[in-house]
Image (cartoon, rainbow, N blue to C red):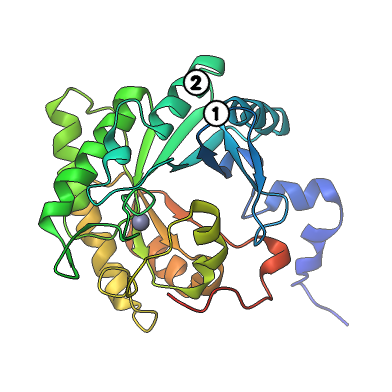
């Protein structure tokens, strides 16, 4: 039968398939998360994420070396301090766990791209991502601490700062704080559309950041909303975000697509659930 349209022509050999591939996922596009704790020679298994561990700075340096050998050239750091308090002091302490981890990594591998998660929840005794007063998570008082945290990460040598708190106006506050101190070259990767999600169960176990009361639904997004994701992205872009992220990614691919279509900056997709756990119900709280 005569048929001039034969898409299979371009699937005939591996060479041709590679030549015309529209999407080329490769290791240079991946970011490896690491969870850093105090101490030395510490390596704690995270039950909910087999194969992923919480490590002290010395082991982190070793692990990042393995990442580089595998061809993964970017890492994102989450810090777990020895002590938590109401004011999240460990988050912006120049000698805090993440700040020391950044310095050690940049010292060992100047070529490694070190991204820091910027949030307060790992450092606050109540486990929320902002300042709490009378049981309420306050927006504007949180911005000051979040900006201070990003600034101290940048001073420690972070290549990119990544705010994940979902407070209104945080990207602008961070941009201003960085620029005021001559750090205008440090990009902001914003968790722009971050949904309140039970998919974070394993992550919360890893980072020890489960809220001690209530949940995060007054600041993280409602899973029923996709238009609102576009609004969040637009606001972050307006405030100076250089890269925008959707989290969680795999369950929100429609949102990833919408964000890709409306944003003219790189779009990052975060999935914190390990493969082996994709099908398991995890922590029910959000
Ligand atoms: Zn947080």
Q: Indicate yes or no: mark 2 CB to ligand 1 under 8 Å.
A: no
> Spatial distance from mark 2 to mark 1, Cα to Cα?
7 Å
Q: Looking at the image, tell me whether mark 2 or mark 1 is earlier in sequence order.
A: 1
Residue 271 visible in the snapshot = no
Q: What residue did someone put label 1 on?
A: 57
Q: State left or right for residue 161 relative to residue 210.
A: left
Considering only vertical position in the picture, is 138 above or below 218? above
| The one of 167 and 202 positioned closer to us in this rendering | 202
Q: Quadrant of residue 34?
A: top right
Mark 2: secondary structure = helix
- Residue 191 horizontal side relative to residue 50, left or right: left
Task: Identify which residue is drawn at 26% across, 68% down.
Answer: 219
For residue 236, above or below residue 77: below
Query: Callout 1 environment at 10 Å: few (<14), some (14 to 19), or many (20+)?
Result: many
Where in the figure is residue 2, as x and y percent of width and height?
A: 84, 79
Q: Residue at x 37, y 84 (%)?
A: 224
Q: 284 left or right of 55?
A: left
* Residue 82 placement: quadrant: top left
Residue that appears at 68% across and 53% down: 21
The label nearer to you, 2 versus 1, is: 1
User: What x and y, as percent, mark residue 3?
Assistant: 80, 77
Residue nearer the viewer, 7 or 235: 235
Picture quarter with the C terminus = bottom left
Q: Position of residue 136 (x, y in %)?
A: 17, 69
- Residue 149 horizontal side relative to residue 57, left or right: left
Label tally: 2
Q: Is residue 53 visible?
A: yes
Q: Which residue is mark 2?
A: 104
Q: Quadrant of ligand 1?
A: bottom left
Closer-to-camera residue (216/233): 216
Task: For the residues labelled 2 and 1, say whether their Cβ atoms are less than 8 Å apart.
Answer: yes
The residue tagged with tag 1: helix, strand or loop? helix
């Amino acid at each position: 039968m005569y048929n001039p349209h034969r898409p299979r022509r371009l699937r005939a050999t591996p060479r041709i398939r590679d030549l015309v591939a529209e999407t080329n996922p490769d290791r240079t596009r991946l970011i490896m998360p690491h969870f850093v704790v105090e101490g030395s020679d510490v390596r704690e298994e995270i039950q909910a994420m087999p194969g992923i561990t919480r490590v002290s700075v010395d082991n982190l340096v070793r692990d990042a070396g393995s990442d580089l050998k595998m061809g993964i050239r970017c890492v994102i750091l989450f810090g777990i301090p020895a002590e938590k308090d109401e004011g999240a002091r460990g988050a912006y302490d120049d000698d805090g766990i993440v700040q020391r981890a950044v310095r050690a990594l940049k010292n060992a591998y100047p070529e490694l791209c070190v991204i820091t998660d910027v949030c307060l929840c790992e450092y606050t005794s109540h486990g929320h991502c902002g300042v709490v007063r009378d049981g309420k998570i306050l927006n504007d008082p949180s911005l000051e601490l979040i900006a201070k945290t990003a600034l101290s990460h940048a001073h420690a040598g972070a290549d990119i700062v990544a705010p994940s708190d979902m407070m209104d106006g945080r990207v602008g506050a961070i941009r201003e704080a960085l620029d005021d101190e001559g750090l205008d070259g440090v990009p902001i990767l914003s968790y722009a559309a971050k949904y309140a999600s039970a998919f974070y169960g394993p992550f919360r176990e890893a980072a020890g950041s489960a809220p001690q009361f209530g949940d995060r639904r007054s600041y993280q997004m409602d899973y029923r909303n996709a238009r609102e994701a576009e609004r969040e992205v637009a606001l972050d872009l307006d405030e100076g975000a250089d890269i925008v992220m959707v989290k969680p990614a795999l369950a929100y691919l429609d949102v990833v697509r919408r964000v890709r279509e409306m944003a003219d900056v790189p779009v990052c997709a975060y999935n914190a659930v390990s493969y082996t756990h994709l099908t398991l119900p995890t922590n029910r709280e959000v």
